[in-house]
Image: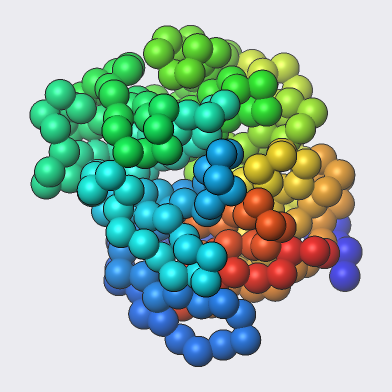
């Protein structure tokens, strides 16, 4: 079914979702492909070279195998990937160091780190030890957008994360994403916002679902999100209309569309892969 719903986001509900502590996940049986997780998932991306789905977690980047099982941390790196994005063929991440993280990556915050070999090795490139980006994304042109936890300014980078400038907008956002038109979207306590001027200004989308999770497909042509009641939504027309595509089991931690078109959602059942052909 197709719905256009009022974005009356409950601020208290979103705050609870944002601040809920990380908990271990246990697998459950079901009709969908399900894989139990023992870590918290912050983001889900697709390796642009191989098409592999990768989870950005409290314990590093974990690859999802073709049978749905979750592998070990890529490169043996067990850092807390609070923010994770793909720009070109590179991975860009932010968060906190793990027990085996090299000191030069920074502490207590990683700032911005970059990998040009699909997560095998990383280099600190900006804000080392200074900033922690939870909202981090990239557009189809490679421009990075991020909001760090120490200020509400939307920052942008056009050189793969090495240098950043303030875009102009100041917002409190849970998630950022960009579609194939270059429109930037942000989920906020007041509803879903959009920007057509590179995050200089944002305006509300009056009829969007009350989303807190939101991401774009690998080709940026579709959006997928989860609202505060756990309903999963897809839009294929730049957020003009939304199609209900299932629901999360309990609280969803992250959601994405995979290279094969499935919906990957990390929730209280673990990692589930759902049909995304709505």
Q: Is residue 242 left or right of residue 78?
A: right
In the image, residue 276 above or below residue 27: above
Q: Camera-side residue: 159 or 189?
A: 159
Residue 7 seen by the camera: no
Q: Camera-side residue: 151 or 262?
A: 262
Residue 152 seen by the camera: yes
Q: Position of residue 81 (x, y in %)?
A: 34, 44
Q: Position of residue 19 (x, y in %)?
A: 36, 55
**Which picture quadrant has residue 124?**
top left
Quarter of the image where the C terminus is located: bottom right
In the image, residue 211 above or below residue 117: below
Residue at image location 36% in from the left, 70% down from the top: 37
Residue at image location 65% in from the left, 51% down from the top: 259
Q: Residue furthest bottom?
A: 29
In the image, residue 154 above or below residue 120: above
Q: Is residue 54 left or right of residue 58?
A: right
Q: Position of residue 247 (x, y in %)?
A: 64, 73
Q: Position of residue 134 (x, y in %)?
A: 41, 39
Residue at image location 55% in from the left, 45% down from the top: 50
Q: Is residue 166 left or right of residue 59?
A: right
In the image, residue 72 above or below residue 192: below
Q: Is residue 193 left or right of residue 55?
A: right
């Amino acid at each position: 079914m197709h719905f256009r719903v009022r974005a009356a986001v409950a601020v208290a509900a979103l705050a609870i979702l944002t601040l809920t502590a990380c908990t271990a996940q246990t697998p459950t049986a079901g009709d969908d492909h399900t894989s139990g997780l023992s870590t918290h998932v912050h983001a889900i991306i697709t390796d642009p070279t191989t098409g592999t789905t990768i989870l950005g977690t409290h314990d590093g980047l974990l690859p999802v195998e073709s049978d749905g099982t979750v592998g070990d941390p890529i490169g043996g790196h067990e850092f807390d990937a609070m923010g994770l994005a793909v720009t070109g063929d590179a991975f860009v991440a932010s968060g906190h160091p793990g027990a085996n993280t090299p000191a030069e990556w920074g502490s207590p915050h990683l700032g911005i780190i970059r990998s040009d070999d699909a997560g095998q090795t990383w280099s600190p490139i900006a804000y080392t030890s200074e900033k922690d980006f939870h909202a981090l994304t990239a557009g189809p042109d490679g421009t990075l957008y991020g909001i760090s936890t120490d200020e509400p300014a939307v920052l942008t980078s056009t050189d793969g994360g090495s240098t950043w400038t303030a875009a102009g907008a100041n917002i409190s956002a849970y998630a950022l994403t960009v579609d194939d038109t270059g429109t930037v979207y942000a989920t906020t306590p007041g509803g879903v916002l959009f920007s057509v001027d590179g995050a200089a200004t944002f305006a509300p989308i009056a009829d969007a679902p009350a989303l807190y999770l939101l991401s774009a497909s690998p080709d940026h042509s579709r959006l997928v999100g989860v609202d505060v009641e756990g309903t999963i939504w897809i839009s294929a027309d730049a957020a003009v209309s939304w199609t209900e595509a299932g629901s999360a089991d309990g609280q969803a931690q992250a959601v994405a569309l995979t290279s094969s078109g499935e919906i990957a959602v990390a929730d209280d059942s673990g990692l589930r892969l759902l049909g995304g052909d709505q």
